[in-house]
Amino acid sequence: MSLVERATPADREAIERLVTACITAEGGRPKAERVSWAVEQVLKNRFPGALFVAREKSAVVGVVLAVYTPSAELGRLLVVNDFFVDPAWRRKGVGRAMAVRLLAEAKAMHVDRIDLEVLPRNAEAAAFWKAVGFTTAGRMIYSKDIA
Ligand SMILES: CC(C)(COP(=O)(O)OP(=O)(O)OC[C@H]1O[C@@H](n2cnc3c(N)ncnc32)[C@H](O)[C@@H]1OP(=O)(O)O)[C@@H](O)C(=O)NCCC(=O)NCCS
């Protein structure tokens, strides 16, 4: 099973490379400045959150970036903004190991709920989150791109 642990500044380059490759593999257009900014916010504790990496030997094969958000209605939310496994390492339990680590973090931080978004076309991610015990709760996401 992969070792999942809190990322350190030494992991930054590997994290950014993996996130960029995963976004490209999913058909997206990664923005280097955005990837670097988001990783830095959590890594340097500029924004309260959790950044974990999954390692196989010394290689970073998975990354999860989540942030703490207060909600008057729902309490302490942990919002998962990025969750990727290296395509070469999928279906080997890496994602599950990261989800287990995320749940342990949430419990330790007295989080009330973990939230995340999955695109309707991303059947793999939907199957994954269902397999690790998450449900949609019938909610809809409304968004507006500003930048
Ligand atoms: C979704 C993702 C994180 C899963 O990671 P993973 O390491 O392959 O997942 P695991 O091997 O731990 O799978 C755990 C279980 O999830 C389910 N699952 C995972 N991938 C699946 C797929 N492609 N199809 C169907 N079920 C799947 C299975 O039940 C699996 O258990 P099994 O292998 O014993 O059948 C990975 O495919 C990924 O990085 N996708 C691209 C990025 C993404 O979509 N992120 C999520 C958006 S928030």
Image (spheres, grey):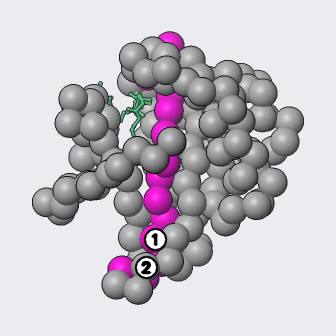
Quadrant location, ligand no. 1: top left
| Residue at 43% across, 21% down | 28
Mark 2 — residue?
A: 71
Amino acid type at circle 2 is Ser
**Crowdedness of circle 1 by 10 Å Cα count: few (<14), some, many (20+)?**
some
Mark 1 — residue?
A: 77
Asked whether 121 or 30 is in front, the reply is: 30
Q: Main secondary structure of the magenta part?
A: strand
**Of helix, strand and loop, which one carries label 1?**
strand
In the picture, residue 90 is in which quadrant?
A: top left
Q: Which residues are magenta?
A: 74-90
Is 125 magenta? The answer is: no
Amino acid type at circle 1 is Leu
Residue extending farthest to the bottom is 72
**Discs 1/2, front:** 2
Q: Is residue 37 visible?
A: yes
On whether ligand 1 comes within 8 Å of the CB at mark 2, the answer is no
Q: Residue 113: where, in percent of width, then height?
A: 39, 70
